[in-house]
Amino acid sequence: MAAQDLYNTVTLSFQNVWANVLTFLPTLIVAILILLIGLIIASILGTVVEKIFEALKLDVLLSKIGLAPYFERAGLRLRGAYFLGQLVNWFLIIVFLLAASDMLGLYSFSEFLRDVLGYIPNIIAAVLIMLATVVLANFLRKVVSASVASAKLHASKFLGTLTWWAVVIFGILTALIQLNVAPSVINSLITGFIAMIALAGGLAFGLGGKGYAEHLLNKLREHTEEHR
């Protein structure tokens, strides 16, 4: 009797497992099909986006604004069209993977994928910030160098490079804030950086401009005494 009960229990357990497998199997197949279709669509659309930006000569434009040397120094090749194509490709892969995950009831994994999708706009914004930063930094370096040189002052290249680094550092810190990388720390760094520039400027004027300021005060005193 005990053996019969054990047999019935084991048989019932296997029947329940098999029933669950048969119930889950169609859902699994549909989820796999959704993922496969998503991979195909993502690959096609990613390639289309890449070809569109290649036709628009995006890489040529990025090279003209001065980005190519920075990639070459890092041992990389400037491929803006490829980057955008891959961005579209992976965005769609994550979207279809999220649909498959929801269908399978993997809600924790789905929540993680939603966080990834919500983070992608921050990445795009950070990239745009860095592009604008490099363009602005290159432009201001040329303006400052040319202005200082035309005024026949010394260290035009140094001041131009200093301007470039100041803009780039602000751009990097802003991009990190956009990426939510320790925003409180970054804000403290920005405040400290501004204070450092102000202190350096004050010291430079106090030490380097002391003689000129004294000269101006003497001229003012002489002019005042002459018109008494």
Image: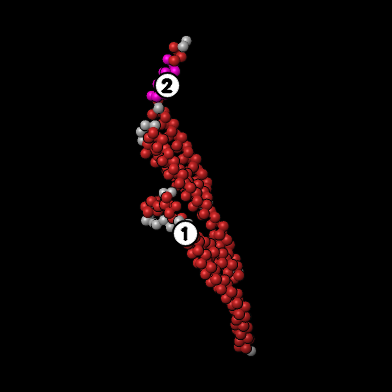
Distance from the alpha carbon under mark 1 to that under mark 2: 61 Å
Quadrant location of residue 30?
A: bottom right
Quarter in which the N terminus is drawn:
bottom right
* Whether residue 131 can be seen here: yes
Seen from this angle, which residue lies furthest top? 228
Q: Residue at x 39, y 31 (%)?
A: 151
Mark 1 or mark 2: whose residue is earlier in sequence: 1
**142 over 123 or under it: above or below:** above
Q: Which residues are magenta?
A: 211-222
**17 over 103 or under it: above or below:** below
**107 over 228 or under it: above or below:** below
Residue bearing the label numbered 1: 55
Residue bearing the label numbered 2: 216
Quadrant location of residue 104?
A: bottom right
Q: Position of residue 79 (x, y in %)?
A: 43, 57
Residue 96 part of the magenta-drawn span: no
